[in-house]
Image (cartoon, grey):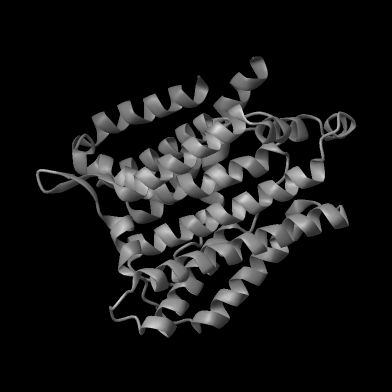
Amino acid sequence: MAPLVSLALLVAFFMLAAPNFVKIATATAILKQGSVLAIVAAGLTFVLLCAEIDLSVGMIALWCAASCGWLYQRWMGGDGGEPFWTVSAVLLLPLASCLLLGLVSGLLTVWSALPSFIITLAMMFIAEGSSRYLTQSKLLKIPSLLATVGNDGLRWDGRVIVPYSALLAAGVLVAGHVVLQHTRFGRYVYMTGGNREAARLAGVRTGRIVLACLAISAVTAGLGGLVNAGRMTNVTLDQNKDLLLSAVACVVLGGTSLFGGEGGMGKTTIGVLTFTVLNAGLIQITWINDLARQLLTGVVLMIALVINGVLAKRN
């Protein structure tokens, strides 16, 4: 209940401190901002549940968006005329490359017996360097479909109420929940994170579980990168620089353990809402400038994490 209490307290505070917080536009902005984090955090939840970490999600998201923009401008000129099959290839090929990067990270982690921290750190630099080489530090255009997903949505009275990106994020979270709670693979993920040696002795191929979780994390990171590029309507090298830390904060804020075996998509959803409500609320308070906003965000996150940790220890 601790993450829910933290979220409720934040909402109550901002309702009093920022009169403009209670508006449909604010709720829509929270859904737009939170959708990218939710997609990336969903895959990262799998990794944390099996007691691993993936430091490459931010740069893999950048790589996916950059390769999509590069293919779009190379094949279509970036100025319209978007055949369905070509657009599909422009979107699916970068996601397939993200899957390949995730599989490489997983294979090296299992084969070398090195911590995933080290392997994914190296993969982070590989993805970032590849993105810089591919884009040559230039702004790239993206298919109009991504811009529609990132900025449009279900409308009421001419205004966007539920963004398409939020619907996509909800679909990813629901799919992740079903996999974790209602499949054998999901049970094996929890067993691997809870006690890897016991899971191995019980017949679980823990190496394959780690490999699959890192591959899932890479694909969701790529999907999040595409949605984020759609929100920005272009690809730039700095648009995912804070994505890794924000996604990890969301997962941990929800109550998923960094040591594996405890957590789930429901908790990750609460963590994403808490993080985005905090950011959106601080923006609504006009007397807090940009320099102080980041400091206050860190302080509030620290307090929330400590409270969650203390309550979890008592339980």
Count of labels in the image: 0
Query: Observer-nearest residue: 165 or 135?
Result: 165
Q: Is residue 256 left or right of residue 62?
A: right
- Give the side of residue 11 with respect to residue 210, left or right: left
Left or right placement of residue 296 versus residue 110 in this view = left
- In this picture, is 39 found above or below 98? above
In the rendered image, residue 5, in percent from the top left (x then y), is placed at 44, 22
Residue 61 appears in the picture as rendered: yes
299 or 259: nearer the eye?
Answer: 259
Q: In the image as oriented, which residue stretches furthest toward the top?
A: 315
Whether residue 77 sits left or right of residue 112 in the image: it is left
* Residue at image coords 49%, 44%: 298
Q: Is residue 215 above or below residue 268?
A: below
- Residue 166 placement (x, y as % from top left): 35, 45
Q: Residue at x 43, y 51 (%)?
A: 36
Residue at the left extreme, as displayed: 157
Q: Quadrant of the C terminus?
A: top right
The quadrant where residue 7 appears: top left
Q: List the single residue furthest toward the front.
A: 85
Q: Is residue 237 visible?
A: no
Residue at 34% x, 60% y is: 231
Q: Quadrant of residue 90?
A: bottom left
How far across and down, in percent of the image, does residue 40 sit? 52, 49
Residue at the (53%, 68%) spot, across then down: 93
- Direction right: furthest residue: 201
Q: Nearer the viewer, residue 253 or 176?
A: 176
Q: Tell me the quarter of the picture where residue 63 sits.
A: bottom right
